């Protein structure tokens, strides 16, 4: 058009020219901006068409695409592994618990006897008693002559197949047999040591049992056994009287030792010193048969100790801690207290669940029962307060009563302050 001015490129043309990139310049992505830029920058790239390789990650490596059920499968595998480990742990604990049962724990024990105990002619009697036990025994030299020690041979757990087949544990008990003559001499030396020493000093217990040179003696529990002490003292005194020389011909060798002059009170005082200062117990036995019975009882007690310790560590089944082990759960609002009270009544001997429920229904709490006792005027009325409560029996269908015996026992249990009182006279 003539006379018209020449116009520059329009807005669309200018926008298009702004995106023209030279072939010599590196291509760079425009930096995003705006409120949705951060979300857009952190979002993964969209998946390509089917069959195309996965989009590359920030480091140029292809991103692994997770299957929809892969996370759930991994959780199931971990849960199965945990269940397998828990079952194995329970199986090992059950196997160890079965070994500690009283009927089986004695088979794990081994009695180690010093050969010096076989020198006496009467030792066959106690060896016969020892052989009757359901346990092993061996004769091998001990650190203390004429002593007996115990070992526990525990099989290795199931989770350690490469370890030793049997794990041996040394018990802390040591039984030492002392001859009557030697025991009296040692006891006399002990009495002289703490009589002549200052009152504040500790007596020398090595006079009775030399333990200073023994390794690990502080972790052991020692006990002494003396067989035939009374018979030895009686025979020694009679022999001393028969061999007593005339006044003009005294022989020092024929005179009895000073240890035989110890009275029974002095011997008891020395035994108290041994018990208090050295924790050493002394057992006096008359025959070798009694010595064998003592070794047998001590072996059984040592064998059952882990079982009793395991029982003591368990919680009481009647505590209101939960619903496991026949317990009762008590809620914060008091729900379950009636069940606990009924279980407590059921702990008495010869009390059925129906009898306990009848008493708990008549007096729903211990405080209500104590109030009923306070309202009674005489002791006989208190003892017979629960005797006429009817009890419904599901077996016979006939109603019966609680009875005066159980009523008396519950009354004494509720009001007595004597911890040694025997409630059940027929037990």
Image (cartoon, rainbow, N blue to C red):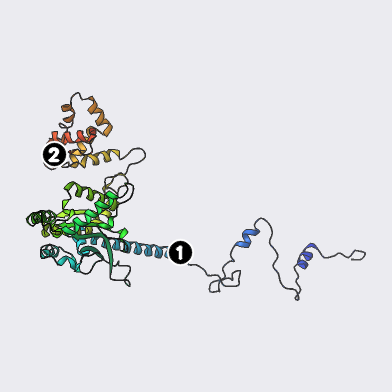
When asked about the image quadrant of residue 32, the answer is bottom right
Q: The residue tagged with tag 1: helix, strand or loop?
A: helix
**How far apart, in angstroms, are the residues tagged by discs 1 and 2?**
67 Å
In percent of the image, x 22 and y 53: which residue is there? 188
Does 401 appear above or below 233? Answer: above
Q: The residue tagged with tag 2: helix, strand or loop?
A: loop
Sequence order check, earlier mark of 1 and 2: 1
Circle on res. 71: 1
Pick the residue in front: 176 or 268: 268
Asked whether residue 228 appears in the rendered view, the answer is: yes
Q: Farthest residue in the bottom direction?
A: 24
At which x and y percent is residue 223?
Answer: 23, 56
Q: Farthest residue in the front direction?
A: 248
Circle on res. 3: none
The residue that disc 2 covers is: 425
In percent of the image, x 13 and y 36: which residue is there? 399
């Amino acid at each position: 058009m003539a006379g018209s001015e020449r116009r520059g490129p329009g807005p669309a043309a200018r926008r298009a020219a702004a995106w023209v990139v030279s072939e010599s310049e590196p291509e760079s992505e425009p930096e995003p901006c705006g409120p949705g830029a951060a979300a857009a920058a952190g979002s993964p790239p969209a998946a390509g068409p089917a069959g195309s390789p996965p989009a590359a990650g920030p480091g140029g490596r292809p991103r692994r695409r997770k299957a929809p059920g892969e996370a759930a499968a991994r959780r199931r595998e971990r849960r199965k592994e945990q269940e397998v480990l828990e079952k194995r742990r329970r199986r090992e604990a059950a196997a160890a618990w079965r070994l500690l049962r009283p009927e089986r724990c004695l088979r794990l024990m081994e009695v180690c006897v010093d050969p010096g105990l076989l020198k006496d002619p009467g030792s066959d009697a106690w060896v016969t008693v020892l052989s009757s036990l359901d346990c092993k025994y061996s004769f091998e030299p001990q650190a203390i002559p004429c002593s007996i020690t115990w070992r526990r041979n525990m099989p290795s757990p199931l989770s350690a197949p490469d370890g030793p087949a049997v794990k041996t544990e040394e018990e802390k008990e040591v039984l030492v047999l002392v001859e009557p003559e030697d025991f009296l001499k040692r006891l006399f030396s002990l009495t002289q040591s703490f009589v002549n020493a200052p009152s504040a000093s500790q007596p020398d217990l090595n006079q009775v049992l030399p333990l200073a040179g023994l390794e690990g003696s502080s972790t052991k529990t020692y006990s002494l056994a003396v067989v035939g002490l009374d018979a030895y003292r009686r025979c020694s005194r009679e022999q001393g009287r028969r061999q007593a020389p005339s006044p003009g011909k005294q022989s020092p060798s024929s005179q009895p030792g000073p240890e035989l002059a110890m009275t029974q009170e002095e011997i008891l005082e020395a035994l108290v010193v041994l018990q208090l200062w050295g924790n050493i117990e002394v057992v006096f036995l008359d025959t070798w048969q009694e010595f064998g019975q003592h070794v047998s009882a001590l072996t059984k007690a040592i064998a059952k100790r882990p079982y009793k310790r395991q029982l003591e560590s368990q919680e009481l089944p009647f505590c209101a801690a939960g619903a496991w082990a026949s317990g009762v759960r008590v809620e914060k609002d008091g729900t379950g207290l009636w069940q606990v009270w009924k279980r407590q009544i059921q702990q008495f001997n010869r009390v059925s669940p129906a009898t306990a429920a009848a008493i708990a229904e008549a007096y729903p709490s211990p405080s209500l029962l104590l109030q009923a006792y306070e309202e009674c005027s005489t002791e006989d009325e208190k003892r017979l307060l629960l005797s006429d409560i009817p009890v419904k029996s599901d077996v016979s269908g006939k109603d019966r009563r609680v009875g005066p015996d159980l009523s008396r026992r519950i009354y004494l249990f509720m009001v007595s302050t004597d911890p040694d009182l025997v409630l059940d006279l027929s037990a």
